[in-house]
Amino acid sequence: MKDEENGGGAGDDAAAAASLPGTLSPSCSSLAPLRLGVLGSGKGSNFRAIADAIAAGGLAAETRIVISDVEGAGILTLARERGLRAEFVAPGRFKTKLEPEAEERVVALLRAADVELVVLAGYMRMIKPPLLEAFPRRIVNIHPSLLPAFPGLEAWAQALAAGVAETGCTVHYVDAGMDTGEIIAQRRVPILPGDTPATLHARIQVEEHGLYPAVISRLART
Ligand code: GRF
């Protein structure tokens, strides 16, 4: 099942773009690629899907920088393999957020790279005011559930434990809460008999890899 919803309802790409809640700067030319800054903590399969869509000509964007709070993160390796700038920023003493100085460093790197849209792709820390205020309504995230259901960690396991018939993935704007920002688009994934956390997460990720590039593409055209 691949129901894609866009705030006010489903439609073709043009209609979906028109219905997206919020737009990027009016100064963004529809001809210029959207300049992305990607933040991730893990293996980076969503980043790979975005990079592949750009390389295939299906997404009018360019990745200006990839930043991770995890020095050995796969997402940094994927970026370097593609010749992209990849930076590790030491997170500091907290587990769920960056040290304020570290977040200021992230903001400085994104600004120096002239980033227009910050794309969270498996980034495992809360976003705090320095970054939120530097990129108001310019930060998006992908979450492995049909928000507002199952925010937080291992949302696929939460869905299995709750016994629901379907779950999915959501792209949303980022605010100060945990997975609470305005929803941009979702795709549904049925929960099948015999699903384990691993099989369910794998099927959700297949949908993520289609949804995230599609949403960024629409944002690039608004
Ligand atoms: C994805 O399931 C995403 O929804 C969540 O973190 C995971 C990241 O996976 N936010 P990857 O690093 O993109 O493979």
Image (cartoon, rainbow, N blue to C red):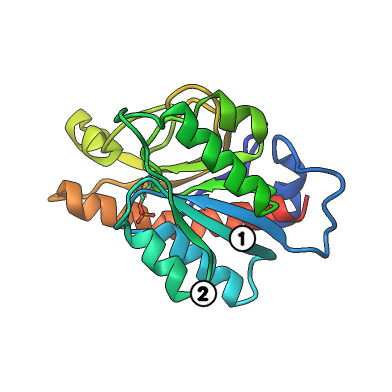
Residue 155 in view in this figure: yes
Q: Could you say where residue 34 lies in the image, as x and y percent from the top left?
A: 71, 57
Rate crowding at label 1 as few (under 14), some (14 to 19) or many (20 or more) other CA atoms within 10 Å: some
Mark 1, residue position? 64
| Callout 2: SS | loop
User: Compared to 128, does 55 lie above or below?
Assistant: below
Q: Are marks 1 and 2 in contact (CB under 8 Å)?
A: no
Task: Name the residue at 20% across, 32% down.
Answer: 163
The total number of labels drawn is: 2
How much space separates mark 1 and mark 2, taking CA atoms? 11 Å
Q: Earlier in the sequence, mark 1 or mark 2?
A: 1
Task: Name the residue at 18% across, 46% down.
Answer: 197
Task: Name the residue at 83% across, 59% down.
Answer: 30
Residue in the foreground of this view, choosing between 22 and 41 = 41
User: Compared to 32, does 167 lie above or below?
Assistant: above
Q: Could you say where residue 175 lies in the image, as x and y percent from the top left?
A: 55, 26
| Callout 1: SS | strand
Tag on residue 176? none
Q: Quadrant of residue 135?
A: top right
User: Compared to 207, does 58 lie above or below?
Assistant: below
Q: Could you say where residue 146 lies in the image, as x and y percent from the top left?
A: 42, 36
- Quarter of the image with the N terminus in it: bottom left
Rate crowding at label 2 as few (under 14), some (14 to 19) or many (20 or more) other CA atoms within 10 Å: few
Q: Is residue 175 left or right of residue 12?
A: left
Residue 140 in view in this figure: no
Q: Is residue 51 left or right of residue 22?
A: left
Mark 2, residue position? 83
Q: Quadrant of residue 133?
A: top right
> The residue under label 1 is which amino acid type?
Arg
